[in-house]
Amino acid sequence: MTPLDNELRNLLKRQEPPAGFAEGVMARLDERPAPVTFTRRLSAFFGQPALRWVAVAAVVCVIAVVSIVQHQRRQRMRERAEQAISALEIARSELNTALQQAQHMTVQAISAPRETSARKE
C-alpha cells in the first residue's frame, strides 16, 4: 500500500461521534423552521443559475417586444402625419385655384358694368 492509501484509510475510518451529538441533533429537529416568505422563495428560485438566465432572457424578450411595438406605432403615426400633410397641400392648392378664379370673376364683374354703361352712352 502506498502512503496515500494509508492516509485515506485513516481519514475515512469510523469514528465515534462526540458526546452530546445525538441530543444536539434531536434538539434541532424540535426547533421550528423559519417561516418561508415570498422573498425567500423568490431568492431560492432565482438562486439557481439556469433559472436566473431564463429570467434575464424573459426580461430581454419583453423589452424587445415593447420596443418593436413602440417603433411600429411611431411609424404608423409618421405615415398618418405624412398623409395629413399631403392632404393639406392638395387642399391648399385647390383653395389657391378657387381664390384665383374668384378674383378673376370679381375683376370681370366689376369691369363689366362699366363696359356696358360706356357702350350705352
Image (cartoon, rainbow, N blue to C red):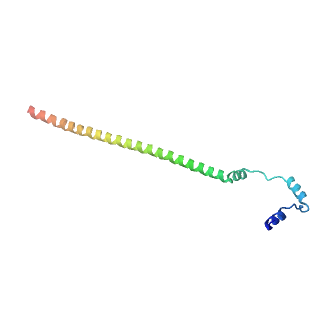
Residue found at x 55% / y 49%? 63
- The quadrant of the image that shows the N terminus is bottom right
Closer-to-camera residue (98/84)? 84
Residue 6 percent coordinates (x, y): 82, 65
* Placement of 28 over or under 115, stated as above or below: below
- The quadrant of the image that shows the C terminus is top left
Left or right: 44, with 117 as reference point: right
| Outermost residue to the top | 120
* Placement of 65 over or under 121, stated as above or below: below
Left or right: 87, with 99 as reference point: right
Residue found at x 10% / y 35%? 118
Residue 3 percent coordinates (x, y): 80, 68
Residue 49 percent coordinates (x, y): 66, 54
| Outermost residue to the left | 121
* Placement of 92 over or under 8, stated as above or below: above
Closer-to-camera residue (11/90)? 11
Left or right: 100, with 89 as reference point: left
- Picture mark count: 0
| Outermost residue to the front | 1
Residue 77 percent coordinates (x, y): 44, 44
Residue found at x 81% / y 52%? 33
